[in-house]
């Protein structure tokens, strides 16, 4: 679980028989590194990669937009901020784009 969201990590197969998972999301890195598989050496951080950086609490910096109550409202609002509507096909993409634009939608269902 990352926050309140269930997450499946899809590792990509490599030609040498290994597999990789690439992310710059420090929450995902923390979850992966806290797992027993990481602790037991089943997977490890790539050489040269740094430790997960602390995540700044972005929620405190976001401007709540309470008038947004549906996913469609959110897509239209973000499109007006310059986000391409075609990139907003899932709730996660909408929340991520809103966070990048410095807003949140606390009443969105």
Image (tube, rainbow, N blue to C red):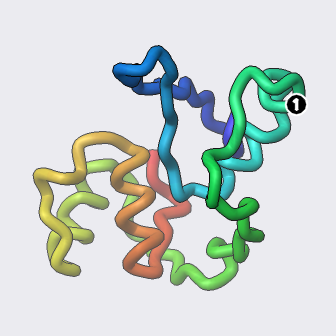
Residue 12, given in percent of the width and then of the height, sits at 41, 26
Image quadrant of residue 37? top right
Query: At numbered mark 1, what does the secondary structure look like: helix, strand or loop?
Result: helix
**Where is the N terminus found, in terms of image quarters?**
top right
Residue 25, given in percent of the width and then of the height, sits at 57, 56
- Tell me the residue at 81%/26% (across/down): 41
- Tell me the residue at 42%/46% (across/down): 92
Q: Which residue extends farthest front?
A: 16
Residue 38, given in percent of the width and then of the height, sits at 79, 30
Please name the residue that numbered disc 1 is placed on. Answer: 39
- Tell me the residue at 61%/46% (across/down): 46
Asked whether 27 or 82 is in front, the reply is: 27
Q: Is residue 91 left or right of residue 33?
A: left
- Tell me the residue at 62%/84% (across/down): 61
Image quadrant of residue 16? top left
**Dot 1: few (<14), some (14–19), or many (≥20) neighbours within 10 Å?**
few
Image quadrant of residue 35? top right
Asked whether 7 or 63 is in front, the reply is: 7
Vertically, is 5 above or below 68? Answer: above
Residue 23, given in percent of the width and then of the height, sits at 51, 49
Residue 66 visible in the snapshot: no
């Amino acid at each position: 679980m990352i926050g309140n969201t269930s997450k499946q990590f899809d590792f990509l197969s490599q030609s040498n028989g290994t597999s990789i998972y690439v992310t710059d999301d420090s929450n995902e890195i923390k979850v992966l590194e806290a797992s027993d598989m990481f602790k037991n050496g089943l997977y490890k951080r790539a050489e040269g990669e740094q430790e997960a950086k602390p995540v700044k609490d972005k929620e405190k910096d976001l401007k709540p937009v309470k008038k947004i109550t549906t996913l469609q409202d959110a897509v239209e609002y973000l499109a007006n901020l310059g986000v391409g509507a075609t990139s907003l096909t899932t709730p996660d993409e909408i929340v991520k784009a809103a966070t990048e634009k410095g807003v949140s939608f606390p009443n969105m269902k």
